[in-house]
Image: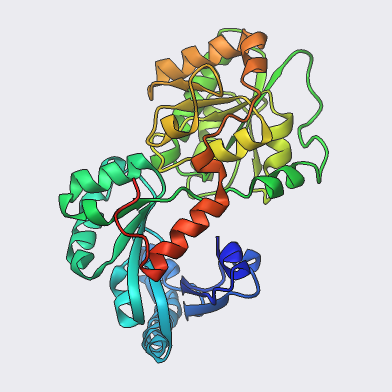
Amino acid sequence: MMRRLADRGWKITLVLTTGGGALEPLVDPRVRIVRLRPYAAGATFKAARGLRDTLAALPDLVAYGIARIIGGLRATLLWRHRFTAAVTLLQGADTRLIFRTRSERRFHWIRNDLAHLDDKRRIVDRIARADAGLDGYICVSRAARDSLVASLPCTADKAHVVHNLVDASDMREQSQREGDPFPDRRGEEHRIVTVCRLSDTAKALFRLADICAALRDEGHVFRWFVLGDGPDKERLRARIEALDLKDILILPGRTQNPFPWYMHADLVAMVSYFEGLSGVINEAKIIGAPVLATRVSGVDEQLIHGVSGWIVDNTRDAIFEGLERLLADPDTLAKLRTVGLAPAILDDEAKLDALEALFLGTSGKAVT
């Protein structure tokens, strides 16, 4: 999105709470990056247990304090610049920073169905406190917008739906950059792929492992590859060991190019507990991969059940039954190899037009 806006002549400043993130090198060089805290610190002190560990972690606490002071000073310096629009990009982030900038308009991005978040109350309270000073909310799906309005009816006239940009041509080009990333197929096995952050809270990883074991016990021949990294990686590894799945449920790690995986997979499975608008579904369908997805917010805006994807209820049994059906039905799997995304999701130029209209204050009523 930042790259495409820069192509249209926008000068963009990206403010990061902490510098050094893995995705930083991917940011377009035309984007000015302000790192409030120049480095990550404090985690070692927070995790310390016992007097010896606490004393040993004191330098980390001092580094954290210094980083916070630097962050405060850098945030104050943002006042020197005048912005057309200031946006809080993460719905759980503190909105106070955008009110410390000289901006003509201020927005808050809503990326999930608020009803399913563990910290919903904290996020809703924070949005409510900021609402009077916000010019609008940019929601990645109708379901995300509906959840916001249900939680805070006062936001209805300011809540706009603008789907995430997808850049379909670039995705298709990336899918051709590499060959088949899977190991050699073992006999008639099916190859299932899931791409996600390895966090059980949203992505239902432990349930995924249990379903994998149940499919194996029913005699299905497959390997399930879960691409990504995250806080529950080691716990998932332990679950895989406990269920004796090490040759069936594979963790290849994080990849910057999942598109060859989508292209060569027999099935892409998105089995999260909740999403805002699943980027994995968009990516897989643009490549033309068959997709099984749990019924999460936004999925009905992306897939037509039985035509462009297979939608199942968000329960262990429903996911298991859906996978059993597809693994045993090659004709249906072949039928699902189609793009089939709605024009509203595919049309990036229309999304950029909508964003520009919001930032410039020319959009009128909320886009629903």
Residue 316: horizontal and vertical position, in percent? 41, 20
Which quarter of the figure has residue 266?
A: top right
Which quarter of the figure has residue 74?
A: bottom left
Which quarter of the figure has residue 325?
A: top right
Residue 279: horizontal and vertical position, in percent? 53, 43
Above or below residue 297? Residue 17 is below
Residue visible at 41% across and 72% down in the picture: 42
| Visible residue check, residue 114 | no
Depth check, front residue: 83 or 191 = 83
Residue 330: horizontal and vertical position, in percent? 67, 10
96 on left or right of 11: left
> Which corner quadrant holds the C terminus?
top left
| Visible residue check, residue 173 | yes
Residue visible at 62% across and 8% down in the picture: 329
Above or below residue 114? Residue 14 is below
Residue 241: horizontal and vertical position, in percent? 57, 30
> Which corner quadrant holds the N terminus?
bottom right
Residue visible at 41% across and 15% down in the picture: 317
308 on left or right of 189: left
Depth check, front residue: 123 or 220 = 123
Above or below residue 164? Residue 97 is below
